[in-house]
Amino acid sequence: MLNTIERRHEIVLLTEQHGKVSVKQLSEQFGVSTVTIRYDLNELNKRGLIVRSRGGAVASNRLTQELSIKEKQKDNYQVKKSLAKEVASLIENGESIIIDSGTTTEEVAHCLSSKEDLVVMTNGLNIANELARLPNCDVYMVGGQLRHKSMSFHDSHAEERIKNFNFNKVILGVDSIDISSGLSTHFEPEAKLNRVMCNSAEKVVVITDSSKFGRSALHSILPLSNIDILVTDSGIPEEFVKILTELNVDLRIVEKD
Protein backbone atom coordinates (compact mmCIF):
# COMPACT_ATOMS: atom_id res chain seq x y z
CA MET A 1 0.00 0.00 0.00
CA LEU A 2 1.22 3.48 -0.82
CA ASN A 3 2.20 5.83 1.98
CA THR A 4 0.46 9.19 2.39
CA ILE A 5 2.91 11.18 0.24
CA GLU A 6 2.87 8.59 -2.56
CA ARG A 7 -0.93 8.37 -2.49
CA ARG A 8 -1.35 12.14 -2.68
CA HIS A 9 1.15 12.30 -5.53
CA GLU A 10 -0.92 9.74 -7.44
CA ILE A 11 -4.14 11.61 -6.68
CA VAL A 12 -2.69 14.78 -8.25
CA LEU A 13 -1.59 12.83 -11.33
CA LEU A 14 -4.98 11.14 -11.68
CA THR A 15 -6.76 14.48 -11.37
CA GLU A 16 -4.53 15.98 -14.06
CA GLN A 17 -5.05 13.00 -16.36
CA HIS A 18 -8.83 12.76 -16.03
CA GLY A 19 -9.77 16.33 -15.20
CA LYS A 20 -11.76 15.22 -12.14
CA VAL A 21 -11.88 12.40 -9.57
CA SER A 22 -14.39 11.24 -6.99
CA VAL A 23 -13.93 10.33 -3.34
CA LYS A 24 -15.53 6.91 -3.91
CA GLN A 25 -13.31 6.13 -6.89
CA LEU A 26 -10.12 7.09 -5.03
CA SER A 27 -11.15 5.20 -1.90
CA GLU A 28 -11.62 2.00 -3.91
CA GLN A 29 -8.45 2.49 -5.96
CA PHE A 30 -6.13 3.07 -3.02
CA GLY A 31 -7.86 0.80 -0.51
CA VAL A 32 -8.38 3.46 2.15
CA SER A 33 -11.47 4.97 3.76
CA THR A 34 -13.46 7.82 2.25
CA VAL A 35 -12.57 9.85 5.35
CA THR A 36 -8.86 9.46 4.52
CA ILE A 37 -9.44 10.47 0.90
CA ARG A 38 -11.43 13.55 1.91
CA TYR A 39 -8.58 14.59 4.19
CA ASP A 40 -6.09 14.05 1.33
CA LEU A 41 -8.18 16.17 -1.02
CA ASN A 42 -8.56 18.94 1.53
CA GLU A 43 -4.79 19.06 2.09
CA LEU A 44 -4.04 19.05 -1.65
CA ASN A 45 -6.63 21.77 -2.14
CA LYS A 46 -4.87 23.94 0.49
CA ARG A 47 -1.64 23.62 -1.49
CA GLY A 48 -3.35 24.54 -4.75
CA LEU A 49 -2.57 21.18 -6.35
CA ILE A 50 -6.24 20.32 -6.95
CA VAL A 51 -9.56 22.14 -6.53
CA ARG A 52 -12.00 20.53 -4.10
CA SER A 53 -15.46 19.90 -5.51
CA ARG A 54 -18.65 18.22 -4.30
CA GLY A 55 -17.88 14.51 -3.93
CA GLY A 56 -14.31 14.80 -5.19
CA ALA A 57 -11.91 17.20 -6.89
CA VAL A 58 -11.07 18.75 -10.26
CA ALA A 59 -7.73 19.62 -11.84
CA SER A 60 -6.06 22.90 -10.94
CA ASN A 61 -4.08 24.49 -13.79
CA ARG A 62 -3.47 21.20 -15.53
CA LEU A 63 0.18 20.51 -16.49
CA THR A 64 1.46 23.31 -14.25
CA GLN A 65 1.44 21.77 -10.79
CA GLU A 66 4.32 20.03 -8.99
CA LEU A 67 5.10 18.61 -5.58
CA SER A 68 7.58 20.35 -3.31
CA ILE A 69 11.11 19.02 -2.78
CA LYS A 70 10.22 17.64 0.68
CA GLU A 71 7.38 15.62 -0.84
CA LYS A 72 9.55 14.43 -3.73
CA GLN A 73 12.34 13.18 -1.46
CA LYS A 74 10.36 10.10 -0.40
CA ASP A 75 8.91 9.37 -3.83
CA ASN A 76 10.40 6.12 -5.25
CA TYR A 77 13.34 6.52 -2.85
CA GLN A 78 14.87 3.05 -3.24
CA VAL A 79 14.70 3.28 -7.02
CA LYS A 80 16.38 6.69 -6.95
CA LYS A 81 19.25 5.28 -4.86
CA SER A 82 19.86 2.50 -7.39
CA LEU A 83 19.76 4.90 -10.33
CA ALA A 84 22.12 7.30 -8.57
CA LYS A 85 24.73 4.57 -8.05
CA GLU A 86 24.64 3.79 -11.77
CA VAL A 87 25.07 7.45 -12.72
CA ALA A 88 27.92 7.87 -10.24
CA SER A 89 29.72 4.94 -11.89
CA LEU A 90 29.75 6.95 -15.14
CA ILE A 91 31.67 9.83 -13.55
CA GLU A 92 35.47 9.60 -13.76
CA ASN A 93 38.05 11.04 -11.39
CA GLY A 94 39.15 14.50 -12.44
CA GLU A 95 36.02 15.34 -14.41
CA SER A 96 34.11 18.61 -14.39
CA ILE A 97 30.36 18.07 -14.14
CA ILE A 98 27.22 20.11 -13.61
CA ILE A 99 24.40 18.59 -11.59
CA ASP A 100 20.80 19.73 -11.97
CA SER A 101 18.65 20.37 -8.91
CA GLY A 102 16.30 17.67 -7.62
CA THR A 103 16.02 14.80 -5.20
CA THR A 104 17.22 12.10 -7.60
CA THR A 105 20.30 14.12 -8.54
CA GLU A 106 20.90 14.76 -4.83
CA GLU A 107 21.30 11.00 -4.49
CA VAL A 108 23.93 11.13 -7.25
CA ALA A 109 25.87 13.73 -5.24
CA HIS A 110 25.64 11.44 -2.22
CA CYS A 111 27.32 8.66 -4.24
CA LEU A 112 30.40 10.69 -5.22
CA SER A 113 32.38 10.27 -2.00
CA SER A 114 34.84 7.82 -3.58
CA LYS A 115 35.71 10.12 -6.50
CA GLU A 116 38.88 12.20 -6.67
CA ASP A 117 39.53 15.72 -7.96
CA LEU A 118 36.03 16.52 -9.16
CA VAL A 119 34.84 19.98 -10.11
CA VAL A 120 31.08 20.21 -9.67
CA MET A 121 28.68 23.06 -10.34
CA THR A 122 25.03 22.90 -9.34
CA ASN A 123 21.90 25.00 -9.17
CA GLY A 124 20.57 22.97 -6.23
CA LEU A 125 21.11 24.21 -2.69
CA ASN A 126 20.46 20.72 -1.31
CA ILE A 127 23.05 19.29 -3.70
CA ALA A 128 25.68 21.88 -2.75
CA ASN A 129 25.13 20.95 0.91
CA GLU A 130 25.64 17.30 0.04
CA LEU A 131 28.82 18.02 -1.94
CA ALA A 132 30.23 20.24 0.81
CA ARG A 133 31.15 17.17 2.84
CA LEU A 134 33.48 15.86 0.09
CA PRO A 135 37.10 16.97 0.67
CA ASN A 136 38.26 16.18 -2.88
CA CYS A 137 35.53 18.10 -4.70
CA ASP A 138 35.57 21.74 -5.77
CA VAL A 139 31.99 23.01 -5.56
CA TYR A 140 30.53 25.92 -7.53
CA MET A 141 27.03 27.39 -7.35
CA VAL A 142 25.39 28.92 -10.39
CA GLY A 143 24.05 31.80 -8.28
CA GLY A 144 20.90 33.69 -9.14
CA GLN A 145 17.49 33.79 -7.50
CA LEU A 146 16.54 31.05 -5.06
CA ARG A 147 13.27 29.24 -5.73
CA HIS A 148 12.20 28.08 -2.28
CA LYS A 149 9.85 25.33 -3.44
CA SER A 150 12.63 23.37 -5.13
CA MET A 151 15.64 24.86 -3.28
CA SER A 152 17.17 25.68 -6.67
CA PHE A 153 18.65 28.80 -8.24
CA HIS A 154 17.77 30.34 -11.58
CA ASP A 155 17.71 33.57 -13.63
CA SER A 156 19.66 35.14 -16.51
CA HIS A 157 22.73 35.72 -14.34
CA ALA A 158 22.90 31.98 -13.56
CA GLU A 159 22.61 31.19 -17.27
CA GLU A 160 25.45 33.58 -18.18
CA ARG A 161 27.68 32.13 -15.46
CA ILE A 162 27.25 28.60 -16.78
CA LYS A 163 28.20 29.69 -20.29
CA ASN A 164 31.69 30.52 -19.01
CA PHE A 165 32.39 26.86 -18.17
CA ASN A 166 32.99 23.69 -20.17
CA PHE A 167 31.83 20.50 -18.48
CA ASN A 168 32.48 16.86 -19.28
CA LYS A 169 28.96 15.86 -18.30
CA VAL A 170 25.65 17.33 -17.20
CA ILE A 171 23.56 15.18 -14.85
CA LEU A 172 19.97 16.10 -15.56
CA GLY A 173 16.85 15.04 -13.67
CA VAL A 174 13.47 15.57 -15.34
CA ASP A 175 9.81 15.82 -14.33
CA SER A 176 8.46 14.41 -17.59
CA ILE A 177 9.73 12.53 -20.64
CA ASP A 178 7.59 11.99 -23.72
CA ILE A 179 8.27 10.67 -27.22
CA SER A 180 6.96 13.74 -29.04
CA SER A 181 7.82 16.54 -26.59
CA GLY A 182 11.05 15.06 -25.22
CA LEU A 183 12.21 16.26 -21.80
CA SER A 184 10.01 18.85 -20.10
CA THR A 185 9.40 20.53 -16.76
CA HIS A 186 6.75 22.57 -14.94
CA PHE A 187 8.85 25.72 -14.45
CA GLU A 188 9.93 27.78 -17.46
CA PRO A 189 13.10 29.38 -15.96
CA GLU A 190 14.27 25.88 -15.01
CA ALA A 191 13.77 24.67 -18.59
CA LYS A 192 15.87 27.58 -19.90
CA LEU A 193 18.63 26.93 -17.36
CA ASN A 194 18.65 23.22 -18.15
CA ARG A 195 19.14 23.96 -21.86
CA VAL A 196 22.14 26.17 -21.06
CA MET A 197 23.57 23.40 -18.86
CA CYS A 198 23.27 20.88 -21.67
CA ASN A 199 24.86 23.22 -24.21
CA SER A 200 27.86 23.65 -21.88
CA ALA A 201 28.54 19.93 -21.49
CA GLU A 202 30.14 17.32 -23.74
CA LYS A 203 27.64 14.65 -22.68
CA VAL A 204 24.05 14.86 -21.49
CA VAL A 205 23.27 12.22 -18.86
CA VAL A 206 19.58 11.98 -17.92
CA ILE A 207 18.47 10.20 -14.75
CA THR A 208 14.78 9.45 -14.25
CA ASP A 209 12.63 6.74 -12.74
CA SER A 210 10.17 4.99 -15.05
CA SER A 211 7.13 6.80 -13.63
CA LYS A 212 8.17 9.94 -15.57
CA PHE A 213 7.78 8.31 -19.01
CA GLY A 214 4.71 9.16 -21.05
CA ARG A 215 4.23 12.44 -19.19
CA SER A 216 4.54 15.90 -20.68
CA ALA A 217 4.94 19.16 -18.76
CA LEU A 218 4.34 22.62 -20.16
CA HIS A 219 7.93 23.74 -20.83
CA SER A 220 10.23 21.76 -23.13
CA ILE A 221 13.92 21.27 -22.35
CA LEU A 222 15.38 19.01 -25.05
CA PRO A 223 14.29 16.44 -27.65
CA LEU A 224 15.16 12.81 -26.93
CA SER A 225 17.78 12.86 -29.69
CA ASN A 226 19.95 15.23 -27.61
CA ILE A 227 20.41 12.68 -24.82
CA ASP A 228 23.74 10.82 -24.75
CA ILE A 229 23.08 8.50 -21.78
CA LEU A 230 19.77 7.77 -20.05
CA VAL A 231 19.64 5.91 -16.75
CA THR A 232 16.28 4.53 -15.61
CA ASP A 233 14.70 1.46 -14.07
CA SER A 234 13.20 -1.66 -15.64
CA GLY A 235 9.69 -0.20 -15.53
CA ILE A 236 10.45 1.87 -18.64
CA PRO A 237 7.76 1.28 -21.31
CA GLU A 238 8.95 -0.85 -24.24
CA GLU A 239 8.05 1.81 -26.80
CA PHE A 240 10.58 4.16 -25.18
CA VAL A 241 13.27 1.47 -25.23
CA LYS A 242 12.69 1.07 -28.97
CA ILE A 243 12.72 4.80 -29.74
CA LEU A 244 15.75 5.59 -27.58
CA THR A 245 17.69 2.68 -29.08
CA GLU A 246 16.88 3.91 -32.59
CA LEU A 247 18.18 7.36 -31.57
CA ASN A 248 21.47 5.76 -30.43
CA VAL A 249 20.94 6.82 -26.83
CA ASP A 250 23.11 4.80 -24.42
CA LEU A 251 20.30 3.32 -22.33
CA ARG A 252 21.24 2.03 -18.87
CA ILE A 253 18.40 0.08 -17.25
CA VAL A 254 18.62 -0.73 -13.54
CA GLU A 255 16.49 -3.60 -12.28
CA LYS A 256 13.50 -2.45 -10.23
CA ASP A 257 12.95 -4.38 -7.00
Image (cartoon, rainbow, N blue to C red):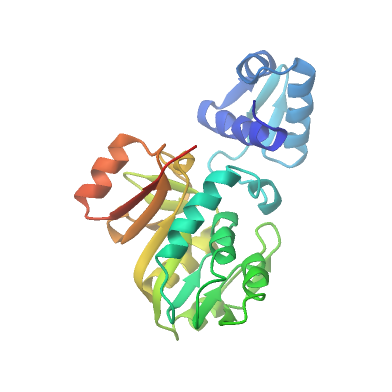
Measured from the top left, where is residue 209 in percent x and y?
47, 45
Asked if 198 appears above or below 79 in the picture, the reply is below
Q: Residue furthest bottom?
A: 164
Q: Quadrant of residue 74?
A: top right
Measured from the top left, where is residue 161 in percent x and y?
51, 83
Query: Foreground: 229 or 200?
Result: 229
Q: Is residue 64 visible to us here?
A: no
Asked if 246 appears above or below 146 in the picture, the reply is above
Which residue is depicted at the point 55% across and 55% down? Answer: 104
Measured from the top left, where is residue 121 in percent x and y?
53, 77
Q: Quadrant of residue 148?
A: bottom right
Which residue is depicted at the point 75% across and 16% down? Answer: 33
Q: Residue furthest front?
A: 114
* Residue 4 as seen in the image, left or right of residue 166: right
* Residue 59 as seen in the image, left or right of residue 235: right
* Residue 38 as seen in the image, left or right of residue 7: right
Q: Residue furthest left?
A: 246
Q: Is residue 218 visible to us here?
A: yes
Which residue is depicted at the point 53% across and 62% down? Answer: 108
Asked if 210 appears above or below 92 in the picture, the reply is above
Name the quadrant of the N terminus. Answer: top right
Measured from the top left, where is residue 127 in percent x and y?
62, 67
